[in-house]
Image: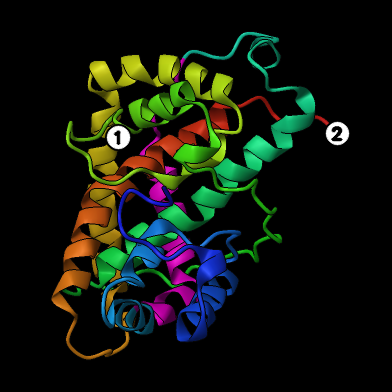
Amino acid sequence: MSDPVPAVIEADATGETARIFTDIRETLGSPVVNLIWRHLATVDGGLEWAWTAARPIYASRQAQAAAQRLYDRLDPPLPCPLAPGALASVGVPDADLPKVHAVADGYNRGNGPNLVALTALLVSPAGVAPNAPVKPSSAPTPLPRLLSEGDVSAETWKLVRAINLLGARPDEPILATMYRHLAHWPGLLALMHAGWSPLAEDGRLGDAIERARNISREEGARLAHLRADAGPAPEAARTALVEFTDHVISRMVPIGRALSKWLPPVTR
């Protein structure tokens, strides 16, 4: 099993798809090509249309600036602080903490800009975002291998699927890829599930997801004037953008930001 939705695996991309994937990574400064782009690569003309339309928003660095404004306003809820030694006790030694942080950072680099920029392809322009300078990003840290169902125990895969439902619809069809990278540390996923479950149950996580969705629509409307004319959108591509921006990316933006804040800092 590679992806629960049709998607092109980065390593398997060839030709124009491989070229666009490389351009996405370089333009976003991201270590991964997020699932939305890999899914669009399975839609006839979808990847070419979406990247042509959205690339100026990213290349101007205004997607990244809008994502930072989104992050600053979001204030996602955090689980209870981790007790000293909690990570080590579940199989995450101090030596692995930089790798875990790299996963959270890698997805934060992509999810926020993707949410605002792809929303900008769906909404009508409304005003203009401030032309805010954005500091150059440091080089992204490579992420651990993306794991699939056959790479992990049945118990770990059940945990991946369970944590993916926190803040999601009961029939959520899209599995957030970040959890598959974190499946190298099942104990961490267990701690995350225990930590985020109360936030999902009392509505705080749902409120944060709704804030992310609403802020992204504001920011997207202010970025929409930057999108390029890529011609008519393939209907399946537009449907995918609505599904991803309304649900999985809006969900993973507050979770990813909260994860970065919740993890102990890396000591050098």
* Colour scheme in use: rainbow
At horizontal 35% and vertical 67% (from top left) the residue drawn is 117
Does 120 appear above or below 36? below
Asked if residue 7 can be seen in this view, the reply is yes
Residue in view at x 42 percent, y 30 percent? 160
Determine which of the numbered discs, if any, sits on residue 268 in the image: 2
Answer few, some or many: residues within 10 Å of disc 2's Cα (few below 14, many 20 plus, some between 14 and 19). few
Helix, strand or loop: magenta stretch: helix
* Residue farthest toward the front in the current orientation of the protein: 150
The answer to whether residue 103 is above or below residue 220 is above
Q: Position of residue 199 (x, y in %)?
A: 32, 19
Image mark for residue 50:
none
Question: Label 1 belongs to which residue?
Answer: 208
- Going from the N terminus, do you reach mark 1 or mark 2 first? 1
Give the spatial CA distance, label 1 vs label 2: 32 Å
Q: Is residue 174 magenta?
A: no
Classify mark 1: helix, strand or loop: helix
For this rendering, which residue is in front, 127 or 20? 20
Q: Position of residue 49 (x, y in %)?
A: 30, 83
The residue drawn where x is 38% and y is 78% is 51
Q: Secondary structure at mark 2?
A: loop
Callout 1 crowding tier (Cα within 10 Å): few <14, some 14–19, many ≥20: many
Please state the extent of the stretch shown in magenta in the rendering.
Answer: 54-79
Towards the viewer: 84 or 214: 84
Residue contact between numbered discs 1 and 2, judged by CB atoms under 8 Å: no
> x%, y% of residue 230?
28, 89
